[in-house]
Amino acid sequence: MLAFCLMLPTLSDIMRPVCNHLTGSIMTTPFIIGIAGGSGSGKSTVTRKVIEAAGTEHTAVIIQDNYYRDQSDLTFEQRIHMNYDHPHAFDWALMAEQLDDLRNNVPIQMPTYNYTEHTRAKETVVVAPATVIVLEGIFALYDKALRDMMSLKIYVDTDPDVRFIRRLTRDIQERGRSMDNVISQYKATVRPMHNQFVEPSKRFADVILPHGANDPAVDMITAKIISLIQSS
Ligand SMILES: Nc1ncnc2c1ncn2[C@@H]1O[C@H](COP(=O)(O)OP(=O)(O)O)[C@@H](O)[C@H]1O
Ligand SMILES: O=c1ccn([C@@H]2O[C@H](COP(=O)(O)O)[C@@H](O)[C@H]2O)c(=O)[nH]1
């Protein structure tokens, strides 16, 4: 088995089998899908619908928000004034390292994030390698190193007013915010950073989903994932 594993790098990179050192079995390089789009565009909804339809057994989801930098060294007062819509807010090295691990069929300890406290939570989540891996987040298509690992790049395109209304409702209901807080953050950082960094990343997309999580688009992505799983 060892000799066979050592010969593997000469095989095609597209369906490159790698040796799982724990089981000795041969596994295929995962198919990585990036799903980007503005805050409130429907990225999480698209991801959830697709994974529900394709089944969780052969799929894994990496939520990019979990890679916001750990800010436990800052006070809460300092944390609420940070810009969470600039690329600098993220731990890109950890994200690339963990996505690369999954690409090489190595399980990861994904960090988790607390939006109410604006910092990384203590808990981590084990993510096992899977045939299809989805990376979802506002900057999923921003970084070249991550893009180069992806086989399918999707941008969820939703009108700004719709995104704002959804974010307002969600942040008040689920992220412990007030209406004034959501409005001032949107004007100060969310909107300008979206225009500067998120929207321009659309040009890297293979597929653009108009109107967010629309059913025909979700059905097409699901069909692609199911066919990948069946052929793996
Ligand atoms: N097509 C849709 N129709 C109605 N509500 C939606 C739709 N897509 C998303 N939402 C709602 O809008 C909010 C933001 O959606 P979400 O998928 O979390 O966006 P994102 O992950 O891009 O920030 C959520 O409360 C979600 O339930
Ligand atoms: O501490 C934080 C961390 C993030 N945010 C906001 O979250 C969104 C990204 O999440 P979506 O699920 O894509 O909406 C980003 O626009 C940040 O502004 C935050 O407010 N506080």
Image (spheres, rainbow, N blue to C red):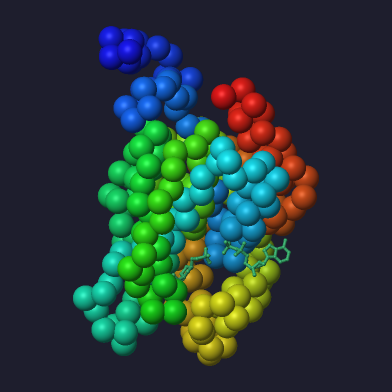
At a point 34% along the width and 72% down the height, the residue shown is 119
At a point 38% along the width and 27% down the height, the residue shown is 23
Residue 119 shows up from this direction: yes
Q: Quadrant of the C terminus?
A: top right
User: Residue placed farthest to the front in the image?
Assistant: 23
Residue 89 shows up from this direction: no
- Position in image of residue 14 (x %, y %): 47, 21
> Relative to 93, does residue 166 appear above or below in the rendering?
below
Q: Is residue 73 left or right of residue 145?
A: left
At a point 56% along the width and 38% down the height, the residue shown is 58
> Relative to 47, does residue 204 appear above or below in the rendering?
above
> Relative to 232, does residue 9 appear above or below in the rendering?
above
> Which of the pair 26/79 is nearer the observer?
26
- Position in image of residue 107 (x %, y %): 37, 42
- Position in image of residue 13 (x %, y %): 42, 19
> Which of the pair 126/98 is nearer the observer?
126
> Relative to 133, does residue 117 appear above or below in the rendering?
below
> Which of the pair 186/105 is nearer the observer?
105
> Which of the pair 26/212 is nearer the observer?
26
Q: Quadrant of residue 48?
A: bottom right
Q: How many marks?
A: 0
At a point 40% along the width and 12% down the height, the residue shown is 11
Q: Is residue 133 left or right of residue 77?
A: right
User: Residue placed farthest to the right in the image?
Assistant: 216
- Position in image of residue 195 (x %, y %): 50, 62
Q: Quadrant of the N terminus?
A: top left
